Image (tube, rainbow, N blue to C red):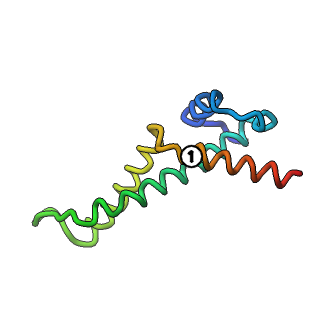
Amino acid sequence: MGAIDFQTQADIAMSQSRKTPNMKHMNVANEAAMRKTAKEFEAMYISQMMRPMFEGTDVEAPFGGGQAESMWKSLQIDEYGKAIADAGGVGIADAVMREMIMLQEASQK
């Protein structure tokens, strides 16, 4: 198994206070993988919700426009979503993680 990065360890430590009794049997690596997946989902969701905010923004010539600018804008929005999720997000990651735990428990019964 690979090493767990510092951000994942911090996420696990922060989630200990929100930990449900059902998570006691999970090992740290499994919990870290679930937390990472939930956080990635939240980042993707946030970036999709932010895309309409940038549709009406126009840029001035000679530095804007074209295919490269639309690609860059898309990547920038994705990074905004990741940054918001890393800063605590909007709570979607916690809900997704709870659902993943419930699905895992149901499949083990």
Q: Is residue 14 left or right of residue 24?
A: left
Residue drawn where x is 81% and y is 36% of the image: 25
Outermost right residue: 109
Residue drawn where x is 47% and y is 38% of the image: 88
Q: Is residue 77 left or right of residue 14?
A: left
Does 92 appear above or below 49?
above
Query: Where is residue 73 shown, x and y percent of the image?
Result: 30, 61
Q: Which secondary structure, mark 1?
A: helix
Query: Where is residue 78 shown, x and y percent of the image?
Result: 41, 55
Query: Where is residue 76 shown, x and y percent of the image?
Result: 34, 55
The number of discs equals 1
Outermost bottom residue: 67
Q: Which residue is mark 1?
A: 93
| Quarter of the view holding residue 24 | top right
Outermost left residue: 61
Viewport quadrant of the N terminus: top right
Query: Where is residue 53 shown, x and y percent of the image?
Result: 30, 59
Q: Is residue 18 left or right of residue 101?
A: left
Specify few, some or many for label 1: CA neighbours under 10 Å numbering under 14, 14-19, or 20 or more: many
Residue drawn where x is 16% and y is 63% of the image: 59
Amino acid type, residue under disc 1 in the picture: Ala
| Quarter of the view holding residue 7 | top right
